[in-house]
Amino acid sequence: MTALPDPDRSRVVLVGASRFAQLAELPAVIANIAVLQEILTSEEVWGLPSDHCTVVRDPHGPRAVSQAVKQAAREATDTLFFYYAGHGLIDPGTGELYLALHDSHVQEVYDSAVPYEWIRRPFQTSRAVRRVVVLDCCYSGRMLGAMSEGLGLAEIDGTYLLAAAAENALALGPPGDRHTAFTGELVALLDRGVPGAGELLTLNEIYERMRSSLRAAERPEPQCRDRNSLGAVPFVPNPAYEPTADAAEEAPESRMRRFVADMAHELRTPLTAITAVTEVLEEKVDQLDPVIRPAVGMVTAESRRLHDLVEDMLELARFDAGTAKLLTEEVDIAKEVAACLKAHEWTDLVTLDAPRPIRAQVDPRRLDVILAELIGNALRHGGVPVTVSLTSRPAELLIEVSDSGSGIPKSTLPYIFNRFVKADSRRPRSEGSGLGLSIAQESAHLMGGDIRAANRAEGGAMFTLHLPFQRHDNQASEAILK
């Protein structure tokens, strides 16, 4: 195994227990889960599809955890990754490790918490070639096998176990900290990388750096167990990696883009945590003092807006670095447009003219990004007709989005796809950040196409997406053109 995990063949289960009936609450666990989900599904790390990352927040019963792990173990053929944050409990009678849930009781763990054995078994039988278990809880070192009998998970080939504390030690969740001590270091390494290290990081490199940092901070030292040298195999990209180059020769524009990318990376982790916490507050808004409800609503909305802005900045950083991924497949374009309209509840607001079928090779996710941006902008300026068509010379797929507004100012039109440019400068607090059209244009370029903007003679603006079209069935294509 020398390649990074294949996201399409990998599965992740993230379990976070933050609220308890009998035990102390762990509010930092909410941020732990949210940030790890964000990082593992980001293109900078794994690019894991969202449906391959199962998040179980504050489960009330052991079965919810068990079912999620068993399903992931059945589906994974490359990497199977399990993470738990919460309280670790020890069965007074057997000494076995249990993972606490909402109703867990210290003296009755056997039927109120998840036995680690329930995690071990599906991992043993999974077809995954890499198995990683990360426990951020007290006594988590017990999973390493020192206290177990027979063949433990630590003896299964292709397995890496990472524990927040030794078998008889407590993990740490410092009051007021955004994350627990262990996960805070893990998140920092995944998100920021290791300066001076290679382009790819191994699990052993992550572990050694975590252990060094936590020891220096006089916090519990993590433990690990590696089977069949999985820990020495490249596991994630190193965001801090820099090819050897003379920094003095770097162009000012490149330095600025690097600064924006670094700033976005730094902001993403705290913003993800803040967003997760505000969402919890939003769920309980009816229980709050009516005086502070509007403030909670405002903070929630603004945190989401800021989170989206940072994600846009990171997306542009991927384009700048040449790391943006293109995953194409043949799809029915009309169906893709209709699906975008339905997802945004725009079906009744948009007139769609699209002959069927027009099948083309595109990246569906990036096409959706483009459509959402163009149609969303047009809806803020009146009616929106959307037309899908084909041209023969050159062979192109065209998607036109028009509005009935006042058009784009002539002074702005040449720069409309530049970053942070807004057509209506009188609305500085409008929903857009000024990055949407830039991202749409970069997405079009990645697919070999282009977006062109113009003002219509009858009023309003028109944006036209041009994408290359390769015909696999000449007769069918000719029939469409006629």
Image: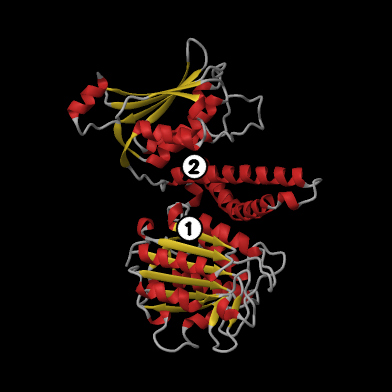
Residue denoted by label 2:
316
Q: Is residue 281 toward the left or the right of residue 327 in the image?
A: right
Q: Is residue 202 toward the left or the right of residue 263 in the image?
A: left
* Mark positioned earlier in the residue sequence (2 or 1): 1
Residue denoted by label 1:
40
- Up-down relation of residue 410 to residue 108 (above or below): above
Where, quadrant-wise, is the N terminus in this rendering? bottom left
Percent of width and height locating residue 92: 60, 87
Mark 2 and mark 1 residues within 8 Å of each other at the beta carbon: no
Callout 1: SS: helix
Foreground: 470 or 61?
61
Dot in front, 2 or 1: 1
**Mark 1 burial class by Cα count in 10 Å: few <14, some 14-19, many 20+:** many
Asked whether the viewer can see residue 211, the reply is yes
Query: Residue placed at 40% from the left, 88% from the top?
Result: 150
Callout 2: SS: helix
**Mark 2 burial class by Cα count in 10 Å: few <14, some 14-19, many 20+:** many
**How far is disc 2 from disc 1 in space, using C-alphas?**
19 Å
Please, what is the three-letter code of the amino acid marked with disc 2? Leu
The answer to which image quadrant residue 332 occupies is: top left
Percent of width and height locating residue 167: 56, 84
Please, what is the three-letter code of the amino acid marked with disc 1? Leu
Where, quadrant-wise, is the C terminus in this rendering? top left
Q: Is residue 388 toward the left or the right of residue 426 in the image?
A: left
Percent of width and height locating residue 42: 48, 52
Given the current orientation, which residue lies at the most extreme left position? Answer: 475
Foreground: 121 or 443?
121
